[in-house]
Structures are given as C-alpha cells and as structure tokens.
Image (cartoon, coloured by chain):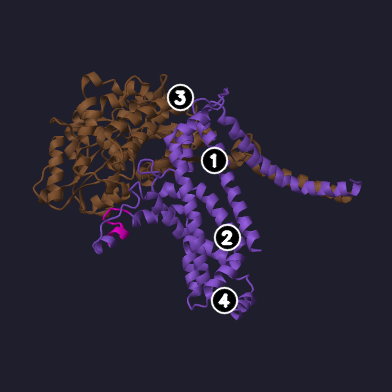
Chain colours: A purple, B brown
Amino acid sequence: MNQRTWKRELNYSLFIAPALLFYVLFSVYPFLSMFYYSVTDYTVRKITNLSFVGLDNYKHLFGSDLLRTGLKNSILYAVLMTVFQTSLGLVLAVFLDRKLATRNLLRSVFFMPAVFSPLIVGFLWGYLMSTSDYGLINQGLEALGLGKINFLGDKDIALYSIVFTQLWQWTGWAMVIFLANLQSIPKDLYEAADIDGASGWKQFWRVTLPLMQPSVNVVAVTAMIGGLKVFDIILALTDGGPGNATQTIMTAYIKTSFNEGFYNRGAAFGVVFFGIVMAITLIMMRYLSKWGEKIR
Amino acid sequence: MRKASITLFVVLMAISMALAGCSGNNGSNLPNGGEGSEKETAEKVKVRLAYWNKEDSVKTLLALIAKKLPDIEVEYQFIDNKQYDNIIATQLAAGSGPDIVSVSPSASTKYAKLGYLQDISALADRYNDAGKNVYSADGKLYAIPGISWFEGIFYNVDIFDQYGLKPPSTFAEELALHKALKDKGIKPQAMGAKSWEPMMKSSMGYVMNEFLAKPENKDFDVQFGQGAKKLADSWVPAVEQWSALIQDGYLNEEMLGIDYDQALDEFATGKAAMWESGPWAMEAIKKKNPNIKVNMFPFYGSQPGPGWLIGGPGVGFAANSKSAHPEAVMKVLDLISTPEGQQAFWNDNKGGSSYLKGVEFEMPAEYEGVKETFKAGNVYAPWNNWGDNAQSLIEEYGKRLQEVLGGSSSVGDALKGTDEKRAELSDLGS
C-alpha cells in the first residue's frame, strides 16, 4: 500500500470513526454486557460482587413455561404478521394504484392507523372487542342474533385478535411502501405484455410481482423483526393474559428481568433471543435473495 | 497532509460534541456558587412525585403543597399500576427515579434493603404503629403511611330496593343473591377480570374469613413468605368453596375480556348490580352517574359475622436516597405528616382512615354497610406479610386464577403454581 492509498484509507476510517464509536458504545458494549450478566448471579438483590454461574441461567430458560410460551407466541405472531401484512399490503397497493376517483382518499384512510401510537390503538380495540355491554363489535354480533366472541379473554383466540388489530394498523404502511415500488415499474412493460396477450392476472405474476421484490424484502424483513419484538400492543390489549396466554418474548423478558428481578435470566433470554432473531432474519434474507435471483 | 489534518479535526470535534451530549451533567450537579446557584435560588425547586393513582386522587394535597411550600414545585407523574413497579424498580436501579416514590409495604422493604430509600425516622413518632410498622425495616422508617385503603363489594341500592333484596351476611347468602339477580335478568356482578387483581382479592376475601382469621393461622402469611408453609397445603378447601362463584357462572369467562374501566361503566350505569372495588372509584362512579345510590358489603365466609375487607395501610410516600433535593423532599413529607396534610389527602380518598396520631375522619354514607367490619378491625391484605416478593406472587396467583376462570386449570394447580413461583423467587437471595 503506497502512502497515497494509506492516507485515503485513513481519511475514510476517520469519517467512519464517530458512527463506529456509537455502534460500539450503544450496540456492541451492551450486548457483551448482557452476555456477561447471563453467566453471573446478577439479580435485584445482588448487584455487586457477581459470581460466575456457568450456563445455569440458560438451563433455567429451557425449563420455564413462561419463556417457552413467550417464544412460541412471538414466532406465531411474527409469521402471521409477515405473511398477512405483506400479502394484504400488496393487494391493497395494486388496487389503489388503479385510476379510482377516491384513490387518494382511500390511500389516506388505509394509511391513517399507522400514525397512531400502539397504546391508543390498544385502548380503542380494547373497547371495541370488549365482552362488556359496551363492546361495539359484540353488540353488533348480538343484534344479528349471534353469540358474543371473547376476542381478548379467550386464551385460544386472544393472540389472533391482537394480530388482527396490528394488521389493521400496519397494512396501510406496507401498502405505501409497495405503492412507491409499483409506481417505479415502467408502463411499457405492461404495454408489451398487453400486446403479447397476457391477462391481468398473468401480468401481476410475471411483471408486477417480480419487480416488487425489493419492497417485498423490506416489508417482510421489518414485519418479521418487528413481530418478534412485539411488546407495546400486548401490554395495552391483554397484558400477556388471560393467565400467560399472550405473553411474548419481550413481555416475558420484562416480567422476568424487572418485575421479578432476575436480571441474569433476563440477560440469558436476551442472548438467546438475539440468536433466534439473527437466524430467522438470515434464513429470510437468503430465501428472499434467492427469489430475487430466480426472477432476474 | 492539510486535508488529513482538517479531517482529523472535524472528526475529533464531532466525537467530543457527541460525548458532551451524552454526559449526565445538568444544572443540579453544578458546584455551588457562580451563576448556576444564583439561578437555582431564584427558581422553584422541582420535586417529582410518582404514583399509580391518577392525579385526581391527590389533587387537594398537591394544591396544599403548592400553597404551603411556595418554593417547591411538585411535578406529578402518573404511572399505571400495571407497570408501576416495573418502571420504578428500573429507574431506581439506574440511580435515578422520582424524588418522592410511592411504594407498597413490600416494595418499601425491598427498596430499603437495596439502599434506594432515605431513612425518614424523624417523622416516625407522628404515626401509630399499625401504619408505620409495615413501612419500617431494621427499626428505621422508610415511608410515611398514607390514607388506608380497603376493597369490598359495592352494590346499587336502587336495584336492591327495586327487587326487595338485602345485602348478604354469609357467602351462601351472597350466592343466593347472585342467583336472585340473575333470575330477574340483572347481571349480578361486574368484574374486570382482564386484570389479575379482582379475582385475587375476591378469593382472598373468602380465605381470610375461613382460614386466616383462625388463631392457629395468624402467622401463616409470614411463614408462607419465608417458605415454611404452602398455599396448596392450606388454602385449597377455602378457594374451592369460593370458586362456586365460577362454577355457578356468576364469574365467567366473558369477564376475562373486560377491564377495570369497562366493569366500572357496567356498575355505574346500572347494568350490573354489584362490583368489587374501593373508595378510589367513587368519584368516577359518581361522574358517570350522579344519581346512583351506592353502599358496600364486605367479603363473607360460611359463618355469619362482620366479614372482612381487603386492605391495609395505603400508599407509602418514600424519599429517594439519590434525590438531588433531599431537603425539599423532607419538607413535602413533613407537610403530609400534619393533620392538614392528611385532611387534604383524605379529601380525594374519602372512606379510608389516617395513621397520623390524633387524626380521625368521618366515614361517608357510601360505606355504612362495612361499619361493623371496621369496628371489628377486619381489614387485611395477606400479601403485606409475604415479604419482598409479594408483588410478583400476587400477580402469579391472580394470573393462575384467570386460568381457572378460563377453564384450563384447577384451583389446586393454581395454588401449586403460586407455591412454585415463591420457591423460584427465593433464588433471588435475601
């Protein structure tokens, strides 16, 4: 490496330094600390003179019903959110890319819920789905002669009810991302497909969908990671209940670490959670990039 | 070379500015003297008070502090009860947190042991033992006891009168009352069982009558907290008898989809004839329905008697040992520990009683039905004697009862699960 190249490299490195410093300070260092705490006896009662306890905290993780339920629910939630948010967002985007008189109004209406805080959405849907005499949806069902549905109080359907509210809130956001991508697809490709006699359905599968790959990647990966981290809407709608039926990774993590004071077990869970999110994200990215290569 | 120097300079400036922005220094940490202290004396001292009840529940007290202590500004912070311990414990562990911390007796003991709270024994002589004992550790007072709290069963007097019904005096009569109301097409009881709290308290109300009130069980709670006794060995018969409310459908799975506010709405608007709650709900009930006539009866057991109310010393106000304004905090606590301060606090919590020596308040008409219970001194919250982990234990117990209500667990399993949680929490150490 000659002196000139070395200087150039040094310049670049110096520019990267601030970002790197922040990354180390706020990502790498906390993660390493978390790993360190996960192999100690760090609890709310023992915050100094920590002792090394090996993999005890990890062993406890796999025996804990709460954490197992949290893991199962988070994965189910994330998969449902990824599949439905992506597919419904895509359908909405394709429909609202057409020349409709109410197109702009409808786009705003579908996007609007994404503006609200999940806590407000939780409060709103908590009332709508309530089984009390003031629950609007159940009042409607009863007026139609149907029985009440215990959306948030039945352990078998509470998680699906939460997924529904989140699809209501976030499908519009996915739609906006897809719309931006749709509008960048050259119109002459559709004209060529028309000349070749391709039907609307065929045009969607052969032209639209393959060229939507970049935005599908963004929406699917963010939905998956966001889904695995879900916390606020669970807190607002069910607080992990009934019982522990809707606990997720994050609510179980907060309960173990801060409500109960097992910082060490919480840290072990954080380390395992990091591994799970990384593995799922890598598999997804790999699958999506293969899809991208296939359609090119 | 010049280019490299400029780059180096820019980068160093960016790093130093960023690090300066991250530093925790603020005005309050400045050494005394100079411009900083002049500004400090000219401005009011800001003291943050965090509490799990809404500001309405202390508005008269806050007005009194503003009037009597003009140099102190109390910044009120409401944190929902669901996450209160969580947030406060995290803040205190980080060496921050509110200057005045509202605590329950178990949280007070826990935080005192961890050194988060200031010793405020200077105020101890003003309070009677019943109030200050639960907020003391190792002979030192760590929080001043507020107005006592209690929870019983509110009933709508007009609905009872309309159908010629009377409040019960035993649990069997309570079940018969539920049946009579249900037969007449009235929802007997509203319950926000989406929260783990109401069933936890309701079942303990029965256990207090049937088990804890017996002289031979007077130390049960302390022993359970220490791990010497188990709920599954002692409470099963009582909780199973209480669960008749579930078996007969008066508490049902639908209630798991209803929260506190929605249950309050049902009771206040006359859709349900009874609702388990306490004095803090009265203002909201009257706001929803100013014409409602309300009375209360306690939790009963199988035998007639004065019954029991769930309750005890209310919120404790503690001083954060890391507060930047310890003198201002003590002034506020001192004011609360006067008859005037207690009166102001009681004004928004009518029904409870004060632990300040020589201070007594008249019981409002809404609590006429529990007068005998108070006279007998039957106000108790078992978990106040369960030790430092009480909050996690009552949550576990309540959540397990939600599973019983949902039909996926039995009373025996719920109590066994709570015992297991107690054993697990002992891993935290002492």
Lower position in the chain sequence, tag 4 or tag 2: 4
Amino acid type, callout 3: Asp
Q: Is residue A165 left or right of residue A1?
A: left
* Chain on which label 4 sits: A
Mark 3 against mark 2, which lies toward the viewer? 2
Query: What is the residue that sits farthest to the bottom in this orientation?
Result: A195
Q: Residue at x 50, y 74 (%)?
A: A103
Q: Which residue is mark 3?
A: B427
Q: Are marks 4 and 3 on the same chain?
A: no
Q: Which residue is mark 4?
A: A198
Residue B92 makes an appearance in the image: yes
The secondary element bearing badge 3 is classed as helix
**Magenta region, residue range:** A130-139
- What label sits on residue A273 in the rendered view? 1
- What label sits on residue A216 in the rendered view? 2
Amino acid type, callout 2: Val
| Mark pair 1, 3: CA separation | 23 Å
Instruction: Classify mark 3: residues with Cα within 10 Å, few (<14), some (14-19) or many (20+).
Output: few
The secondary element bearing badge 1 is classed as helix
Assign the magenta stretch its main secondary structure.
loop
Amino acid type, callout 1: Phe
Lower position in the chain sequence, tag 1 or tag 2: 2
| Mark pair 3, 2: CA separation | 47 Å
Q: Are marks 3 and 2 on the same chain?
A: no
Amino acid type, callout 4: Ala
Lower position in the chain sequence, tag 4 or tag 1: 4
| Mark pair 4, 3: CA separation | 68 Å
| Residue B311, horizontal then vertical, whole percent | 28, 33
